[in-house]
Image: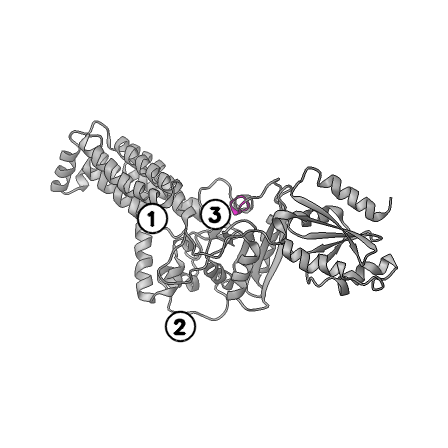
Amino acid sequence: MNAYADNVAYFRRTFDRCEDVTFRSVRAGGRIEATLVYTQAMSSDLRIERNVLLPLMQIQATSPPHEPDRRLDWLVSEALPAEDIVVQSDRERATESVLAGYVMLLVDGVTPVLLIGLAAYPARSVEEPASEPVIRGSRDGFTESLQTNISLIRRRLKTPALKMEMRQAGKLTKTALSVLYLEGIASRSLVEEVKSRLERIRLDAILESGAVEELIKERRMTVFPQLHATERPDRAAAALAEGRVLVLVDNSPFGLIAPGLALEMLQASEDYSQHYIVASVTRWLRYWLAFSALVFPSLYIAITTMHQEMLPTNLLLSIASSREAVPFPAIVEAFIMEMAFEGLREAGVRLPRPVGQAVSIVGALVIGQAAVQAGLVSASLVIVVSFTGIASFIFPSYSFGLAVRLLRFPLMIVAGLLGLYGIVLFLLALLIHLAKMKSFGVPYLSPAAPLNLNGIKDVLMRRPWLAWNKGRQEP
């Protein structure tokens, strides 16, 4: 059996019962036998016909060289008009390429195969990110196409210093990963650390960026995100300009920014599209609401249970009268309402968007009013839970906001057992935990701890554009 027949037999065995893989025999120049192998759903029939079939059929019988060694070079340089052509001798890599949308050409008398890039699979168009909407700012967002996402970054950073290195993860999925950074601005040690962790991934299937994030983060036993996931290419480009590293995962509309720092999770990309005074006030409001989202229900439990003397007499009497018919202690009452609110929020996310919005808003009003009338909870607690729910919507980073929402429940338990002393101890333990954390070697609370005077200026307030120093901003 010659090399051509052996190749055809091997790939027919490999793609046995893969009915979406097509084998198409052609005769180039009327005398050279060849076989095309491609995946129907991931290749364009029109492009295959125009760029491969017609050129092969139009070859003159006297044109192809008779020597098999020269035949492959002649096909690449003269016969086929396609630009993306790769000569591949590794059969496993050739198989992966066919499943990625390449057209494989097997030629009689030649052992290597030709891989022609004519992939054309369905892809979502560029749309505004659903998880990070803005009033003023760019409206484009990442999609599930890796090449589209790379182009959105290249469009913003038109410099050869922007480097892009490809990796692959997943034994079964062979998912393409892209590592982007600005040479000369990003720390070399940071770049090497990111690439090293990606290479250590050992998993059969990588279907989404969330799996990559979990596998390369520094500390596993924490609810706080250690990489910043974003759908916004403008935010990703800004992070690259500050010396960060961006990891893009094929089939995922989220880019992963390393390192991900806590204080940056509270900064919105829209801050830099507004006047710096307005953005600074908004940023401080966001800090206060983020703290309130964590501690407000716990403060209510602690004060109404153990520290009633801290309340003005009129307010204390009002709260006491509203709780007179409630059969539960404050901590149970708060848990009931918080669980109901979180359940409504989760239902609103899972349901279709128009229905979900109605369920989350109307459901909260109806359940709150019904619970008060039934005497299960007090009206004052409904106000506390409503304010806490509003405050929890201000987080620009969904993952960071989710971590704060989860920590609210153990803090409520501690407040019910130890009062304000328990809240203080819990917050101190949380602060120690955050201070000990690092993201790719960078302290998680940077630039606040350790203090970086240059970096903290853009945390306390949104620094005016004229005040920015040229060059890299240290994380």
Residue 45: x percent and y percent?
A: 64, 53
x 42%, y 45%: residue: 432
The magenta segment is: 208-212
Q: Taking 155 as reference, is 323 left or right?
A: left
Q: Taking 126 as reference, is 67 left or right?
A: right
Would you identify the image quadrant in which residue 6 lies? top right
C-alpha span from label 2 to label 1: 31 Å
Label number found at residue 466:
2
**Which mark is first along the chain, 1 or 2?**
1
Q: Taking 67 as reference, is 379 left or right?
A: left
Q: Residues within 10 Å of mark 2 (few under 14, many from 20)?
A: few
Q: Relative to residue 444, is residue 59 depicted above or below?
A: below
x 37%, y 45%: residue: 353
Residue 303 in sight here: no
Would you identify the image quadrant in which residue 408 lies? top left
Residue corresponding to mark 3: 437
Q: What element does badge 3 sit on?
A: loop
Residue corresponding to mark 1: 393
**Which mark is first along the chain, 2 or 3?**
3
Q: Main secondary structure of the magenta part?
A: helix
Q: Nearer the viewer, mark 2 or mark 1?
A: 1
Q: Residues within 10 Å of mark 1 (few under 14, many from 20)?
A: some
Q: What element does badge 2 sit on?
A: helix
**Which mark is first along the chain, 1 or 3?**
1
C-alpha span from label 3 to label 1: 25 Å
Asked whether disc 3 touches disc 2, contact meaning CB atoms under 8 Å apart, the reply is no
Asked whether disc 3 touches disc 1, contact meaning CB atoms under 8 Å apart, the reply is no
Residue 152 in sight here: yes
The image quadrant where one finds the N terminus is: top right
Query: Which of 302 and 263 lies nearest the eye of the viewer?
Result: 263
Q: Is residue 210 magenta?
A: yes
Amino acid found under the numbered disc labelled 2: Leu
